[in-house]
């Protein structure tokens, strides 16, 4: 029995990286005060460069393991999916400036992310809990200048079985990050959709 405990302890202490690839989670359940989408053709620009981080356990268990969080693909898909649901016409662009023929541009930039992990002992099996906080700024520009600007936050909490070699941490971190991302995008979508200045610009 002592040998088994020693082997498990050694596995938990050994270093290993578990990549948490965040999927696209558009917020289609935005609540607005309007029955129609924002009229016109809009450009969508997304920057997720600041949203990659490495989560680590705050307890001794799994402390040697790292959980890189990657929003590179998921964030852009989440932004475009959310905003396409509230805009009459939209087009993704790599240029953060307003182009000809468009009514305006919506630029969403990831600002910060914090991911925390904690291992919770259990009678039969341990659990691992992940909390993710993230923020992003949204700026809407029309032909005559800034129409709307705000920084918003989203939070996600998920847990999973600890798993072999702390592999449950990747599951918990990814799920928490996707929840935080969707909560953040819901706020962004509602703020933009309910902006009278954005709706009334020509």
Image (cartoon, helix red, strand yellow):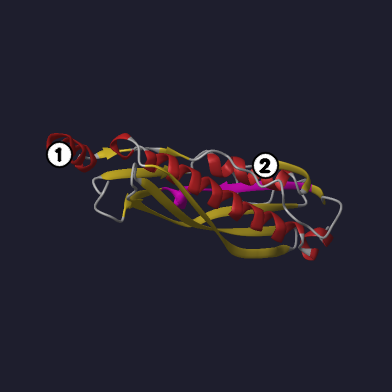
Examine the rendering and report whether any part of residue 142 can be seen: no
Category of crowding for the residue at label 1, using alpha-carbon neighbours closer than 10 angstroms: few (below 14), some (14–19), many (at least 20): few
Q: Is residue 169 magenta?
A: no
From the top left corner, tell me how far across and down residue 71 is, in percent: 48, 43
From the top left corner, tell me how far across and down residue 39 is, in percent: 83, 50
Query: Residue at image x 23%, y 41%?
Result: 12
Compared to residue 134, the image places residue 79 above or below, namely: above
Q: Residue 81 carries which label?
A: 2
Q: Is residue 46 magenta?
A: yes
Classify residue 8 by image quadrant.
top left
Q: Considering depth in this image, is 63 or 93 the residue closer to the camera?
A: 63
From the top left corner, tell me how far across and down residue 170 is, in percent: 40, 40
Q: Considering depth in this image, is 37 or 170 the residue closer to the camera?
A: 170
Looking at the rendered image, the disc whose residue lies closer to the viewer, 1 or 2, is 1
From the top left corner, tell me how far across and down residue 3 is, in percent: 13, 35
Left or right of 18, for residue 8:
left
Residue wearing tag 1: 6
User: Which element is circle 2 on?
Assistant: helix
Query: Residue at image x 82%, y 60%?
Result: 33
Left or right of 86, for residue 92:
left
Q: Residue 77 carries which label?
A: none
Pick the quarter of the image with the N terminus: top left
- Residue extent of the magenta highlight: 41-52
């Amino acid at each position: 029995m002592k040998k088994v405990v020693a082997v498990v302890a050694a596995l938990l202490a050994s270093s290993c990286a578990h990549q948490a690839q965040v999927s696209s989670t558009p917020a289609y359940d935005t609540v607005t005060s309007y029955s129609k989408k924002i009229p016109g053709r809009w450009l969508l620009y997304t920057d997720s460069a600041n949203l990659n981080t490495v989560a680590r356990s705050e307890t001794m268990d799994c402390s040697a393991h790292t959980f890189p969080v990657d929003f590179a693909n998921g964030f852009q898909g989440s932004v475009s999916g959310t905003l396409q649901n509230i805009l009459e016409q939209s087009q993704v662009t790599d240029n953060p400036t307003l182009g000809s023929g468009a009514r305006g541009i919506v630029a969403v930039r990831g600002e910060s992310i914090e991911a925390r992990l904690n291992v919770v002992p259990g009678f039969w099996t341990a659990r691992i809990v992940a909390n993710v906080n993230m923020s992003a700024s949204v700026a809407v520009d029309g032909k005559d200048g800034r129409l709307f600007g705000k920084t918003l936050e989203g939070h996600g909490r998920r847990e999973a079985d600890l798993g072999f070699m702390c592999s449950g941490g990747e599951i918990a971190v990814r799920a928490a990050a996707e929840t935080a991302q969707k909560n953040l995008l819901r706020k962004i979508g509602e703020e933009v959709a309910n902006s009278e200045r954005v709706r009334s610009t020509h």
